[in-house]
Image (cartoon, rainbow, N blue to C red):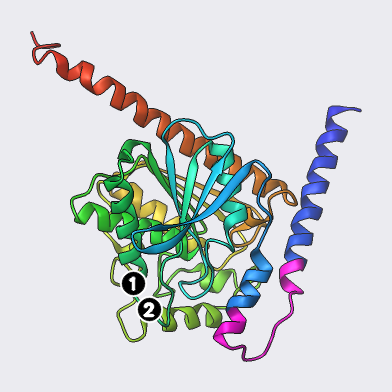
Amino acid sequence: MHPLTLDFMEVRMTRRQREAVDALHRNAPVHPNPTLAEQRAGFALALSRPLPGDVAAHETVLAGRPALDLTPATATGRGRMLHFHGGGYVVGSPGTHAGVAAQLARRARLRATSLDYRLAPEHPFPAAVDDGLAAYRALLDAGVRPEELVLAGDSAGGGLAVATLVAARDAGLPQPAGAVVFSPWVDLTLGGESMRTKKDADPIFTREAIQAYVTRYLLDQDPAQPLASPVFADLRGLPPLLVQAGSNELLLDDAVRLAGRAAADEVEVTLRVWPQVPHVFQHHFGHLDEADEALDEAARFLSARVRAGREAQADRPLASADPGAGRP
């Protein structure tokens, strides 16, 4: 087959995949006035994906909170990923995101721990951030080296990952090797232009639906405070970040502005936006080529950050062995 014919077929295939994903979201059943319990159950049903056969999972406890340990057969060394699930700080759990977290962990060859942080409205802000910081501290206290530790999260979990980095820095803790965030929700003021410009393109959310999450999470608190909306935080001193998003989402500008803020604060940051895919499109791995590409890119980034951290740690004793080394 001619290469140009093959390229055309691949483009046509991925377009059909994108259209199928868009239709899946737009045609999802909508229940009028669901209870909180019904919302959580529906979210779990919609998102849950099976674990890969080569990833072992077991329930554990981290910093007093339930957590899910995911250990791929491919895991090497002492590297660890701390994962935060999405769900607007109101729905979701390590179980709902075990599939995508396991996919990322196995591709990065890292053991992962996904935290079941407290949810609103039972536990409003800053409960989730407190849990994220406590989990990060607990991993360090357990002997996980910061240079071999990375963070990952999607949507609200992406915002929580960044807030945890800021809180850890402010608490005087060492930063991890890096962090990956998928479609991060980092502006609870809902001030991004894409809230308006992407309202027809987004097949999942309306502004009103996102505002309902804000109300439950913050109650009457200021949505612009930095640990709630880390796009307004001072990000200086944070580790390298990889930010991924789709162009068909209301939260697109959250990702773009987070990357811009990080760059302005001299944080090494990479922003990747995939065209014509929705919020946290990575959940569609195995059915959407862009999802697998994004997961592979994120895994390469995390693996490289852990590898660089190990190499820096290995070089450190050599550099300090001779105090006069390198001096004239």
Residue 239 lies, in percent from the top left, at 33, 43
Circle 1 packing at 10 Å, graded few (<14), some (14-19), many (20+), is some
Q: Is residue 203 visible?
A: no
Q: Which residues are magenta?
A: 24-39
Residue 31 in the image: above or below residue 5:
below
Residue 24 in the figure: left or right of residue 313: right
Residue 119 lies, in percent from the top left, at 44, 74
Q: CA distance from mark 1 to mark 2?
A: 6 Å
Residue 294 tag number: none
User: The N terminus is located in which quarter?
Assistant: top right
Q: Residue at x 33, y 53 (%)?
A: 136
> What residue occupies the far right of the structure in this picture?
1
- How many marks the image carries: the answer is 2
Mark 2 falls on what kind of element?
A: loop
Residue 203 in the image: above or below residue 53:
below
Residue 160 in the figure: left or right of residue 56: left
Circle 2 packing at 10 Å, graded few (<14), some (14-19), many (20+), is some
Residue where numbered disc 1 is placed = 127
The answer to whether marks 1 and 2 mark residues whose Cβ atoms lie closer than 8 Å is: yes
Q: Residue at x 53, y 37 (%)?
A: 108
Residue where numbered disc 2 is placed = 123
